[in-house]
Amino acid sequence: MINIYEVNETNAMIDKENLDVRTITMGISLLDCADNSIERVKSKIYDRITSLARNLVKTGQDIEKEFGIPIVNKRISVTPIALVGQSACKTPDDYVEIAKVLDKAASEVGVNFIGGYSAVVNKGMTKSDELLIRSIPAALAQTERICSSVNVGSTKTGINMDAVRLLGDIIKETAEATKDRDSLGCAKFVALCNAPDDNPFMAGAFHGVSEADAVINVGVSGPGVVKYALQNLRDANFEELCETIKKTAFKITRVGQLVAQEASKRLGIPFGIIDLSLAPTPAVGDSVAEILQEIGLERAGAPGTTAALALLNDQVKKGGVMASSYVGGLSGAFIPVSEDQGMIDAVKEGSLTIEKLEAMTCVCSVGLDMIAIPGDTPAETIAGIIADEAAIGMVNQKTTAVRIIPAMGKKAGDTVEFGGLLGYAPVMPVNTFDCSVFVNRGGRIPAPIHSFKN
């Protein structure tokens, strides 16, 4: 039974420690919107989204008011559009037309973002997949709410290096197409390995083909709550440290579970999963990097950072799974540079580099996230960075991702501004040695031996 102490504790987390529910994301299947007429596809997509999600934002706002729990974003994820448009779309421009309809529907229902302008190509690309991928720069430049992703690898299938190499060019083209906004389009695109079907977080969210017609997924947050809980434990041993993180993650997840159940009941749509991820914001005190400092590091990036992040990620999952029977998505700790003030400070002071961030992605939830790099970085180098991250995910049987922004006209040490939750970022230097022969070989990197389990 909930007692008054627990009520007061939760209120303090919300008022003083930046506790929030980061997102309610409604997943919507668009498989039955497929048609050989582009106009009918567009009409079906618009009608389905605006019908199912018409009360999503209002429901989230009502729950916020009634329970006093901030819900930062209300979002939609849809079936990978490369599957929906494969019969009707004959050119990249056809896919851009679908992107505009998705954007219009998202605007109509009032959500922050809509994810699923996506293709899953870890073993090979269909013609439809390739057309969608080639449309991404124009689609992201001509819309406001669209988020896009491409899954290029998996532990079971290996890494599609043809897709990886193509994405190097696509990211550069997207940066150029949105250069008047500090290459903002790249902040809404992510390359993934082992992408989950039920991720509520952008930019990698899509509604997997194994999912129901519609579902409610919730992503929690709470780095500030964990940081606050650790402030008086500087002299504690690892056992006490871990127990505190687990207990805190349990409390955070229970808040998310409450919101998920209420949203599901009020919308009449099944509850899917809670994503346990600690998702930072640019707000002071709401930082994963600052949790690492409370664990005992002078700055994120110092020796011991990867071990501290591994500890944090594991304890968050152990505490969270006790609070909800249905945990999924990414679940762990996000380490985006632009969205985490502690990470930004670490980059500025020289303690955090792309190479150290890559090492940290071996044990975190996602990968190289919201990292600005010089605008003149070659497409082949970007492809090599994606390949490195995909290899980490493939071999370690985990989700990894690359959301990287080649900031046109900017060099290392400059700053890019995105605003809102996307924050701002220092432009980080990249290794300038050439990898073009490697990424241009073509074909597929085979799956690791431990993938063969049948």
Image (spheres, rainbow, N blue to C red):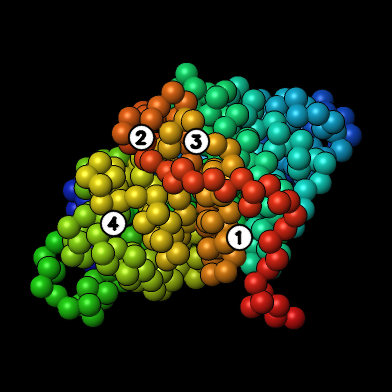
Q: Earlier in the sequence, mark 4 or mark 1?
A: 1
Q: Earlier in the sequence, mark 1 or mark 3?
A: 1
Q: Amino acid at mark 2?
A: Ala
Q: Position of residue 254 (x, y in %)?
A: 37, 63
Q: Position of residue 381 (x, y in %)?
A: 54, 43
* Dot 1: element: loop
Q: Amino acid at mark 3?
A: Thr
Residue at image position (53%, 63%) is 392
Work out how far the residue at label 3 is from the one at label 2, CA to CA, in angstroms: 11 Å
Residue at image position (80%, 40%) is 128
Q: Which residue is mark 2?
A: 412
Apparent side of residue 286 relative to residue 378 in the rendered image (left or right): left
Residue at image position (21%, 55%) is 299
The total number of labels drawn is 4
Residue at image position (50%, 65%) is 327
Q: Amino acid at mark 1?
A: Asn
Q: Which residue is mark 3?
A: 377
The residue carrying pointer 3 sits among few (fewer than 14), some (14 to 19) or many (20 or more) residues within 10 Å by Cα, namely some
Q: Quadrant of the N terminus?
A: bottom left
Q: Amino acid at mark 4?
A: Gly
